[in-house]
């Protein structure tokens, strides 16, 4: 099964760009204008757009690609900011999956996936992966796939 959130990530990247552009343009316009009312209205718009930009940073949206084909679990991900992303990936055999956790944080806006891999006597914990841009159906499908892999590993 393949799960990804490419289109939602593209929308979030556009929101980053638009909110930053509106914040900067409204801030410049509020500095230039001489009217008292216009100055404070555009300053308010600038502050609101900047706060929205910060809110997007706090939710930490990530593009995530999940695949469990060919006997391997493959995860590819990057931060959805238009400028600050670094491509990363995990890949390991299905048989080595030991456990997983899905946590909900930040008023339900952030969901994280933590995978645990068994390698010999050690249990490795992968860094938390943000899956907040997945829809509820995608999260349920991901949970079901991982539960089925765990069940088949225990047999």
Image (spheres, rainbow, N blue to C red):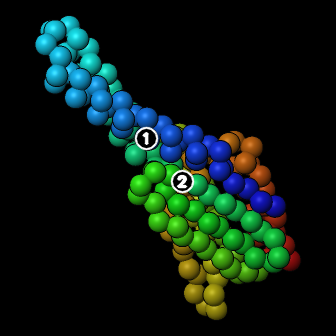
Q: Which residue is mark 2?
A: 62
- Up the image or down, 135 lies above or below 80; here it is above
Residue 103: in sight, yes or no? no
Residue under the point 62% across and 58% down: 64
- Up the image or down, 83 lies above or below 114; here it is above
Residue under the point 58% across and 55% down: 63
Of marks 1 and 2, which one's residue comes earlier in the chain? 1
Which image quarter holds the C terminus?
bottom right
Q: Nearer the viewer, residue 154 or 65?
A: 65
Residue under the point 81% across and 61% down: 1
Q: Secondary structure at mark 2?
A: strand
Q: Nearer the viewer, residue 117 or 50?
A: 50
Left or right side of 30 for 10: right
State the CA–CA distance, disc 1 to disc 2. 16 Å
Q: Are marks 1 and 2 in contact (CB under 8 Å)?
A: no
Residue under the point 57% across and 62% down: 77
Q: Position of residue 147 (x, y in %)?
A: 77, 62
Q: Nearer the viewer, residue 25 or 128?
A: 25
Left or right side of 145 for 25: left
Of marks 1 and 2, the one in the foreground: 1
Q: Nearer the viewer, residue 1 or 41?
A: 41
Q: Which residue is mark 1?
A: 17
Which residue ends up furthest to the bottom in the rendered image?
A: 120
Classed neighbour count for the residue bearing mark 1: other residues with Cα under 10 Å, few (<14), some (14–19), many (≥20): some
């Amino acid at each position: 099964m393949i799960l990804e959130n490419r289109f939602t990530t593209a929308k979030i990247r556009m929101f980053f760009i638009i909110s930053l552009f509106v914040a900067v343009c409204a801030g410049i316009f509020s500095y230039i204008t001489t009217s008292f009312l216009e100055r404070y209205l555009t300053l308010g718009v600038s502050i609101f757009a900047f706060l929205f930009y910060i809110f997007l940073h706090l939710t930490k949206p990530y593009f995530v690609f999940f695949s469990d084909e060919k006997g391997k679990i493959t995860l590819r991900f990057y931060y959805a900011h238009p400028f600050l992303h670094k491509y990363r990936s995990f890949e390991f055999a299905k048989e080595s999956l030991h456990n997983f956790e899905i946590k909900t944080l930040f008023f339900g806006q952030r969901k994280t996936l933590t995978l645990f891999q068994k390698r010999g006597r050690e249990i490795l914990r992968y860094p938390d992966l943000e899956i907040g841009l997945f829809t509820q159906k995608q999260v349920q499908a991901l949970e079901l796939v991982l539960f089925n892999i765990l069940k088949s590993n225990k047999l």
